[in-house]
Structures are given as C-alpha cells and as structure tokens.
Image (tube, rainbow, N blue to C red):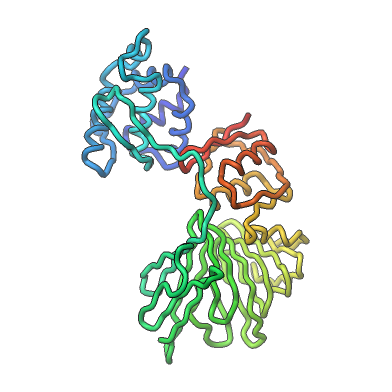
Amino acid sequence: MTNPRLKVLVEKYLSNTLTSTERTALMAMLDELPDEQLALLLHNIETPDTYRPEIPENEISDRLDRIKENLFEQSPVRMLNTDKPRKGSSPVLWKALVAACLCAAIGWTLYQWKGQPQEEIQIVEKTDVDPAEPVALITLATGETIRVDSTRVGLIYSKNGLHVYKSEEGEIVYKDSSMVDQEPTYLTIHTPKGGFTKLKLDDGTLVELNAASSIRYPTSFEGDKRDVFVEGEAFFKVQHDKERPFRVHSQKQMIEVLGTSFNLISDEKYAKTTLIEGSVKVVAEGKDYFLKPGQQAVVSDKVVVKDVKASNSVAWKDEKFVFDNSSFKETLKEVENWYDVQMVFFDPDIENVQLSGTVSRNVKLSELLKVLEMNTNYRFEIRERRVLVRRY
C-alpha cells in the first residue's frame, strides 16, 4: 500500500506548492519506493492542467513535458507488469522518469536524453566527496568579491591603494595605503561549506576560519579598540596590545582580550568560547564572565562556564575530527559543513548517540561515514551532495 504522505507530496509537487524540506523528503521517499507502488501511485494521480516543469533550458523543458504526458496519460501499471519488457526499457524506467522530473525542480542535473521516452536516462551521480580545501571569498567595502583558493599565492588584488596577498603559509594579508585622514574601510571574509582559510589582521593577530564561517574587520585598527565581527567558527591568536583591547562581536556575546588564543563557535542558537591560553572576558546578558585556560563559556538561554579539554575544540585546525562524547547531531552538522553535503534523515527522531574517537579530516567522505557506521546504529548512502541517513 502506498504511503499516503507520498501521494500528498507528489500532488503538492505537481501544483508547485512544495517547501524545500518537503522536496527533500519526497526525493528520499522516491529513492526507496518499489517500482510497482510507484506505478500505482502515478496511475491514480490527476495531473493539474497548470503544471509545467520549471527548467531554464527550453529543450529540456519540452522533453520533460513529453515525459509528463507519458507518465500520466498512459498506464504504467500495464507496462511494468508485462512479461517481456519492451526493447530498451528497464525495470526502473518509470522511477527514473519521475526522478528526472523532480530533479529539475530540486536542482539535480539531467544528462543525455536520446530517442523515445522508453530509453534510458543517464543521471550522473557523484559516489564520493572530497574534504574541505582552502577557499575563501573576500567582499570589499565596494561590494566587489574576490575568490581566493589554494592555487593563488602572492598578490591577488590591487586597487585604489588596497593590496591583498596570500602568503606561502596560506594566510590572507593586506595593506591599505589609502588610509590618510579617512575612516577605515571594512572587509568581510567568508568561507563556504567545504572551505577554510587563514588571515592576518592589521595588528598581527592570526585568525583561522572553519567552513561556513565569516569575519568582518577593518583594514586598519584606529582608536583605542580593535573590533571584529564573527559568525561560524574561528580560532584567534591575538597580538598583545595592552593599550588597545581586542573585541570579538557575535550574535550572543562579546569577547574582550588583550593578548591570548581562543576558539569561538557562534550561530543563532548559541555561542561557545574555549580559552586555550591567556585570559578572556565574555560579556553576555549584561554580565562579565572571566575564563581561565581550559575553560569554556556556552551562551544560549543562559550562560554556563565549565572545564573542558581545550585541545579538542581546536582539533579542526589540525584537520582532525575529535569526538569526545560528542552528540550525533552536532557531529553530522560538522560533516555537512566540512564536506559541503546535506544530510537527509529517514527517521526524524535521531538517537542521542555519544561518539568518541579521532578521525582525519583529510579523508574522503565515504571513509568517514564508514567510521560513523561502525559506531552507531545508522548507515549512510552518498547521492551526489546528499547523504541518506537510515537506521539499521
């Protein structure tokens, strides 16, 4: 018997009312649906007159219209149940055709269509994913964007007195000779999912950005403060200057230091500051919290300061996943950011699995997932940039 929710989702797709979450769920359900059930489902769904696949290329659009007509105007039940399939057809033909239609809306890529609708559709699937690499986007005050990757070393930008370089050590550095009696201009460096970078600020402070993170900072620090703004995860090694405190602003808090090293994770739900050496003051909810090396402040609905193994929080800098009773959800979020993939869960109730161990971040995604499979009750399947997550 066909899942009633699947029928609802297919009908919503045909009327262009699916949300992005529902589209992901629909594709996951279609991946698991037997051919016979798919045929029955299609046979009993009325196609809206207004339905048109949203595809940029006219040629592909026309072909998908023809697929739609064959899918919903012929009897797929009769065709799938024939003793001798037609020449050129396959046992998963109808599933492939529907997947092709849905792929167009979700952003998959359709390749090579030849002949009649009964012929094979070739959908290129990437069976493995490489780990993150040094990639960053620099947004200038003018709105201009510069891409910096592992292939670029030396001067990468020079205009209006601003010079941006990438050192042999992989650090983004800059010089601004236009700052004469002017307010400092701000730069924003963003690392996408699957990317990371290093940079050196005007005062000599070193910053390392993890994947899916950003920092906004002035080309030169003026006055008695050094202020930067961070989202995501970043490690700081702050240059000491007792006359000018260094302040890191994020959604939940502000960190003030003179010279120290610490790791910061900041998103809309919480901020987590782990002190490696020196001392920091965390300002949150109108109160000051002073950390010692090996302590961590977590700011969410309330502020909690606790002792931790500080080296675990900066293991990502050495390209390692370190799990120390880490939650399964947080681990998979790290994996998503590092490999630029999307986790698709077949069961919304994820077990509260606690993981322990160390894995290199330099391995391909399939190798990491094998380790997770051995330590959990879940199995993983890579489909392009999606990872299907199921219970055993």
Image x and y of residue 352, in percent: 68, 41
Q: Is residue 143 above or below residue 5?
A: below
Q: Quadrant of the C terminus?
A: top right
Q: Residue at x 47, y 35 (%)?
A: 25
Image x and y of residue 3, in percent: 47, 23
Depth check: give the residue in front, 158 or 211.
158
Depth check: give the residue in front, 18 or 293.
293
Depth check: give the residue in front, 377 or 266.
377
Image x and y of residue 275, in percent: 71, 67
The quarter of the picture where residue 169 lies is: bottom right
Q: Residue at x 36, y 79 (%)?
A: 159
Could you tell me if residue 97 is visible in this image? yes
Please state the total of marks drawn on the protein image.
0
The quarter of the picture where residue 299 lies is: bottom right
Could you tell me if residue 13 is visible in this image? no
Q: Is residue 122 left or right of residue 256?
A: left
Image x and y of residue 134, in percent: 51, 61
Q: Residue at x 53, y 81 (%)?
A: 202
Residue that lies at the very extreme toward the top in this rendered image: 83
